[in-house]
Amino acid sequence: MEKVISALKGNKLATASAAYRAYCKLHRLPVPQFNAYRDHRRQLPRIPSERVLQASLAIPRSPTWRTYWRLLYETGPRPSEPFDMRVRDVDLETEKVRLGTLKYGGDVAQRELLISPLLSAMLRELIHGKKSDDFVFSMKTDPSRPLFYHRAEKVMEKVRRQLRSAGYDVQGLRLHIYRHAFRTRLYTATRDLSLVQRSLVFWTESYPTASTTKKMTKIEVDQTKAPLQPEIEVKKAVKEEKSRKSPLKVEDLCRLNCYA
């Protein structure tokens, strides 16, 4: 048994050796010593390919969930934040949405992000006939009551199941992964961690630093030279960002066109 455990590595070695030592103490056997090291570092998220993310947007049949999925992909919010959106937070004229943050204590409690004309049209249809204080993602029978997060998780399970049956690799596909994917696309285009932090309200005095954002942002080797479209607008925005005395505002992210 000791030879088998000694052949393991990493967390498996630490877990197996701890269990075997407990077994030896219980049965009053000689307790062996293993040089076990447990890796306490946080595992980086596995971001699915862009092909999988794009395919997942077409799976939900309900207009509500189809709009919700598109919003996750284009703006990168935390999965629970869209359920707090009200009709007054949607500006169809300028094609912007106002998203609050669930992690208060930073410099801002909400931010405005540009959305695509497609998402703007989907939101227009979704909020048609609702009052300004009604929730965007609300119950069908009562617009004043928002949908619950656990219902989105159930829809996510169906999306994963259909994509898997179609032959897609759905490993790592979950609701929060759209936030990581948005962060990765934005950093790939700008190479600016501070801009990524501001776009996601991912910064407070106590929690995320630039190193934290970098750890949670996945940089593919084949993406380092593949800026987002349109390329000219991205380069122009980055050049202006470097020449500005004041930091780029979240509202200026519209020129980056970080949606597909």
Image (cartoon, helix red, strand yellow):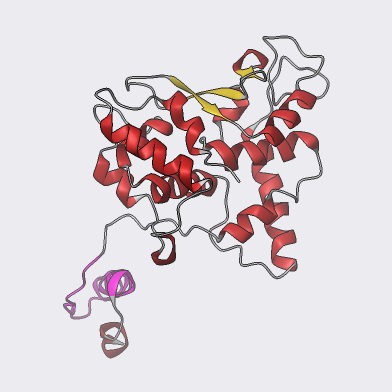
Task: Tell which of 169 and 51 is nearer to you.
Answer: 51
Q: In which quarter of the image is the N terminus?
A: bottom left
Task: Tell which of 30 and 150 is nearer to you.
Answer: 150
**Residue 108 image position (x, y, % from top left):** 38, 19
Q: Is residue 90 left or right of residue 23?
A: right
Q: Is residue 69 magenta?
A: no
Q: From this viewpoint, is residue 101 visible?
A: no
Q: In this view, does 94 lie to the left or right of 61?
A: left
Q: Which residue occupies 27% across, 90% down? A: 3
Q: Which residue occupies 61% across, 67% down? A: 169
Q: Is residue 160 left or right of residue 254?
A: right
**Residue 207 image position (x, y, % from top left):** 28, 34
Please determine whether, in this image, residue 127 is positioned above or below residue 172: above
Q: Which residue occupies 28% across, 27% down? A: 244
Q: In which quarter of the image is residue 198?
A: top left
Q: Quadrant of residue 139?
A: top right
Task: Tell which of 80 and 40 is nearer to you.
Answer: 80
Q: Which residue occupies 68% across, 53% down? A: 56
Q: Is residue 16 magenta?
A: yes
Please determine whether, in this image, residue 48 is positioned above or below residue 228: below
Q: Quadrant of residue 200?
A: top left
Range of magenta residues: 10-38
**Residue 36 image position (x, y, % from top left):** 21, 72
**Residue 151 image position (x, y, % from top left):** 69, 38
Q: How many marks overall?
A: 0
Q: From this viewpoint, is residue 89 visible?
A: yes
